[in-house]
Image (cartoon, coloured by chain):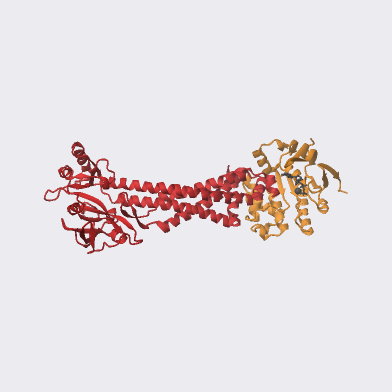
Chain colours: A orange, B red
Amino acid sequence: MPDNTLVRLIDVCKRFNKGSETITIFDRLELSIPAGDFVAVMGPSGSGKTTLLNLLGGIDRADSGEIHIGGIRVDALSESALTRWRGAHVGFIFQFYNLMPMLTAAQNIELPLLTRPGKDRRRHVETALKVVELADRKKHYPREMSGGQQQRVAIARAIVSNPDLLLCDEPTGDLDRATADEILSVLRLLNRDLGKTIVMVTHDAAAARHARRTLHLDKGRFIERDLAA
Amino acid sequence: MASLVLQIFAVTMINLRSIPQRLLLSISTVFAVALVVLVLLGFLAMANGFQRTLTGSGSDDIAIALRGGSRSELNSVVVRNQVNLLAEAPGIARDATGRPLISAELYLVIDAVKRRDQVKANVPLRGISREGAALRKGISLIEGRMFNPGANEIVVGQDVIGEFEGFELNQSITLGTGRWTVVGVFSANGSVFGSELWADAAAVQSLFNRNNVFQTVRAQLESPAALAAFKAYVEADPRLKLEVQSEAAYFADQASRVSDLIRRLGWPLAIAMAFGALAGALNTMYSSVAARACEIATLRAIGFGGIPAFVGTLCESMLLAAVGGAIGAAATFVAFDGLTVSTLGGSFTQVVFSFQLSSTLIVRGVLLALLIGFIGGMFPAWRAARMGIVEGLRG
Ligand SMILES: Nc1ncnc2c1ncn2[C@@H]1O[C@H](COP(=O)(O)OP(=O)(O)OP(=O)(O)O)[C@@H](O)[C@H]1O
Ligand SMILES: [Mg+2]
């Protein structure tokens, strides 16, 4: 395994049971993502994009195969170790932001910090708010913010505990073009300036162009197309 | 550890602040729990009030003798020879002329009509000696005079007048073939005697053709400690097949039998209702977990453990139950505490008493509420903790 590989999937199989029939999402899937990459994942609906993110983020388990992230074999971790690992190493960004409506921006952002020991929670929250340029909105509730602002809060929540890997599931799927572009530039900034490795699922080719490369997922396989040129 | 506490705190805050989204369900749970506590505390306050009223009427330095094995005055028999022997007993106080302060008494019930609903009920008629009134605490004539020895005259406890018709001063009453007159009204300072009619023992004996037969003997002791000597004397004499207790012990025993009965009615009723409230709590909490599935899954995804999800849900449930318990206790206090009622006493007679809440009772009510909250939150909390993250996020 090369030193700079952050994510490595080996022979990953994933099936779901739907009633009596079993559908195979991945059959011996292989993937490797170097640290510092920004990968867009595209593919038809139902091709398993969300499932891939769930496996990478340790909120779903593969039926077989190995998942190595940052040198840790996450598929071998116990449930509680996996929970702790998620809190420290992964940031999730969802299409519908998934903020807690009854908490302010700052309280939402603080949540991941509650899952591990450590001081200076307020300072970390302030820093994350600054990165997403929402310092003046920290006392606002989600309902008082636009979709773009809510997604920035969600991004701040994802980065506040300084994880290596950000997993974004259609982060701009619910936003208009201009707002989507703003969010994408925040992600690009996180990738370029803060060295975050990002895996972003999107249906939007324009969004995918913000990434360094795009993987196309179809029938459980990746087809890579280099869009760098 | 500190982080676990922080997570639990955060999840609990999130749960509690989302209660407005399930306001109606939550309110109905609170209401159901409040009702359970109201019913339970109502019964317990009744039992407590009854017991305190009766226990409070008893003194330590008054001895009561009943036929051995008789648990109440109504089925006790003491004959005149025995009364004469008791008058000689040690430990009994005497007046200035050396006469023992004892009262051989008859205790019967007569019919009377209740003011409130015109229903017939029993009122106790007690035949007492001249010393009878003085052998009871807190008795004072508030109207008229005492009955004269041998006369068909009655003095009436104040509570009887409030509850029953026809016992006002100077009223005449037909008992058997004789006519009796109310010549006085006495206050008994809240004790059970306030619910009685008193007349001269000899007059009552001839009315009921029970010459030479009494039911109890009441004696003033020199001191509470003199009870032992009196008891020993009675036990040593084979002619005296009597049982001697202090008045306080006698009333406590009478009261506990009735108040135990009230409690035995109250608890099962409250527990049956608690099952209803429990079903409501379960329903509310399962909806709470379902409504928050995405939030719980999101928290789990960003590193929250299952324990905070569990405890947070449990806290919500227990809080709803605690609020219900507090409302139920407060409602009991407002509705019942100090409420004066009358009921059938240990001797099938009317006893006037007040509901009395106490802190111990309130604690019991609130504990029952919390138990409902605990069980009602437990299973939904388990579901919250075990819920699949992927399923929660998919919605
Ligand atoms: N928990 C589950 N139980 C059963 N089937 C599932 C489950 N999760 C996903 N699937 C199925 O697996 C397939 C892939 O789902 P997934 O959500 O990964 O697709 P996707 O590529 O993210 O699609 P979309 O673009 O619509 O979000 C779908 O057919 C879906 O119905
Ligand atoms: Mg998807």
Judge from the rendering whether residue A16 lies leftward or rightward of residue B260; answer left or right: right
Residue B172 location (% of width, % of height) = 22, 62
Estimate the x, y position of residue B284 in percent, counting from the top left: 58, 51
Query: Is B244 in front, or is A160?
Result: B244
- Residue at 71%, 38% in the rendered image: A74
Asked if one can make out residue A88 in the rendered structure from this viewpoint, the answer is yes
Q: Residue furthest front?
A: B177
Q: Residue furthest left?
A: B97
Which is more toward the observer, B122 or A198?
A: B122
- The quadrant the N terminus of chain A occupies is top right
Corner quadrant of residue B26: bottom right
Expressed as whole percent of the image width and height from the top left, the position of residue A126 reads 66, 53
Front in this rendered view, residue B57 or A169: B57
Where is residue A214 drawn, in percent x and y? 83, 47
**On the rendered structure, is B24 left or right of B256?**
right
Which is more toward the observer, A46 or B178?
B178
The count of marks equals 0
Residue farthest along the right direction in this orientation? A229
Asked if one can make out residue B3 in the rendered structure from this viewpoint, the answer is: no
The residue at the point 78 percent across, 53 percent down is A184
Residue at x-position 33% and y-position 52%: B344
